[in-house]
Image (cartoon, grey):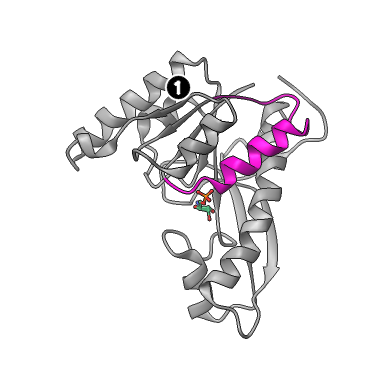
Amino acid sequence: MKFGVLVSGRGSNLGALLRHKANGQLPCADFAVVVSNVAGVRALDIAAQAGVPAETVDSRRHPRTPEGRAAHEQEVLARLRAHGVEAVVLAGYMRIVGAQLLGAFPHRILNIHPALLPSFPGLHAQRQALEHGVKVSGCTVHLVDAGCDTGPILLQAAVAVLPDDTEDSLSARILAEEHRVYAIAVDAMSRGRVRVSSDGRRAWIADSDAR
Ligand code: GRF
């Protein structure tokens, strides 16, 4: 299955996926293109170093209006289509996905969030968790829908929140789990093992391949 990866920044999850691929752990996944909405970010270098086409569709070239966002997304979609992409991985992509991408890849867009959803959606999830005082947090891989971090949950991994944690220390502990579980989710998607309930609320990984 051909994947397009959408990024906006650091690219550590992208790097982890590409390392898994290089190690032979994602045999059914092909990373066809990486598209960033921000020019010059580290994620683009990581893609290029791995020999994956790295492209920028700068979202600042469009007005911050519904029409501007739709025009940007149309361009992103065109890049994905040009590379034959069949499924999309959001890896630190700081944009809400709109109707065009959702319509083009139904149940085929994955996101990873650094908290145990539905707790702490949105920005600064690790800080939200610390400020709330939870004792367990983690990360969530989910299918993307029209909301912000609301789509059906595919996988979660938990980590302890320690008394002396800072935002940085908790983020690092969660990030190690992100890098591990995102590969499991992409592998499942690439094998056609992702299932969604008829009401669209629940998602899970089936035991057998089906494409
Ligand atoms: C990760 O914490 C991810 O959960 C969130 O954005 C961050 C991206 O980090 N969606 P990176 O760009 O993959 O290093």
Residue 192 drawn in magenta: no
Asked if 160 appears above or below 198 in the picture, the reply is below
The image shows residue 153 at horizontal and vertical percentages of 61, 48
Quadrant of the rendered image containing residue 8: top left
Residue at 45% in and 22% down: 80
Give the position of the N terminus as an image quadrant.
top right
Does residue 193 appear to the left or right of 10 in the view shown?
Answer: right
Give the position of the C terminus as an image quadrant.
top right
Does residue 164 appear to the left or right of 39 in the view shown?
Answer: right
The extreme bottom residue here reads: 163
Q: Say whether residue 112 is visible.
A: yes
Mark 1 Cα within 10 Å, few/some/many (few <14, many 20+)?
A: many
* Disc 1: residue Cβ within 8 A of ligand 1's nearest atom: no
Asked if 140 appears above or below 167 in the picture, the reply is above
The extreme right residue here reads: 207
Q: Please state the extent of the stretch shown in magenta in the rendering.
A: 9-32
Residue 21 drawn in magenta: yes
Secondary structure beneath disc 1?
helix
Which residue is the site of mark 1? 80
Residue at 52% in and 68% down: 126
Q: Say whether residue 107 is visible.
A: no
Residue at 19% in and 43% down: 64
Quadrant of the rendered image containing residue 161: bottom right
Does residue 61 appear to the left or right of 78 in the view shown?
Answer: left
Does residue 194 appear to the left or right of 208 in the view shown?
Answer: left
Asked if 133 appears above or below 96 in the picture, the reply is below
Residue at 53% in and 65% down: 119
The image shows residue 174 at horizontal and vertical percentages of 63, 62
Asked if 125 appears above or below 4 in the picture, the reply is below
The image shows residue 37 at horizontal and vertical percentages of 35, 37
Q: Amino acid at mark 1?
A: Leu
